[in-house]
Image (cartoon, rainbow, N blue to C red):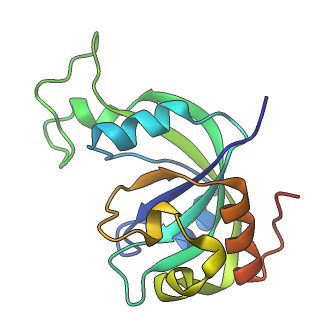
Amino acid sequence: MTRRYWLMKSEPDVFSIEDLAAKDFEEWDGVRNYQARNFMRDMKKGDLVLFYHSNAKPPGVAGVAEIAAEAHPDRTQFDPKSEYYDPKSTQDEPRWDVVTVKHVETFDELVSLATLKGAAELEGMHVVRKGSRLSVTPVDQEHFQAVLELAKAKTSVR
């Protein structure tokens, strides 16, 4: 099986890399975009994730996580008290999934979006494209490694 690479966005005031580090494992819930959900359905145990802090000052990649459990139904879609409740979703035909992520590394310094956009080797990466708003996107292995090098990360894909 070939390992794949991803970028997942979270607002740090909702769930940050530090929150993941404190818990070690967490379900990535609340995704309510079909394309992002479909990407999550493609994730396999052992895939690596760039953990991106969105709606932050500055936004950027804060660390690395690993897929610890593959896609399964997001329980929040069935809970009327949840902000992620979906009345059209049923137990027999759930619409939304989660994956479980495991903390791998928190970077010493955030790799800002401005830094990502300024790196020629990251041209074409989803997150640097104008208008890229998806919360879950695939990342080429070369782009993933380039971000790790910008972060001076301990993690490597080589």
Does 56 appear above or below 155? below
Residue lying at 38% horizontally and 37% vertically, measured from the top left:
37
Q: Nearer the viewer, residue 34 or 87?
A: 34
Residue 22 showing in the rendered view: yes
- Name the residue nearer the viewer: 23 or 91: 91
Q: Nearer the viewer, residue 109 or 6?
A: 6
> Is 85 above or below relative to 119?
above
State left or right for residue 69 relative to residue 79.
Answer: right
**Left or right side of 90 for 88:** left
Looking at the image, which residue sits at the far top? 92
The structure residue drawn at horizontal position 52% and vertical position 64%, both measured from the top left corner, is: 124
Judge from the rendering whether residue 117 lies leftward or rightward of residue 104; answer left or right.
left
Quadrant where the image shows the C terminus: bottom right
Residue 98 in sight in this render: no
Q: Quadrant of residue 65?
A: bottom right
Which quadrant does the N terminus fall into?
Answer: top right
Tell me where residue 139 sits by quadrant.
Answer: bottom right
Residue located at (59% from left, 83% from top):
111
Q: Position of residue 63 (x, y in %)?
A: 63, 71
Task: Please give left or right for residue 95 compared with residue 72 in the image.
Answer: left
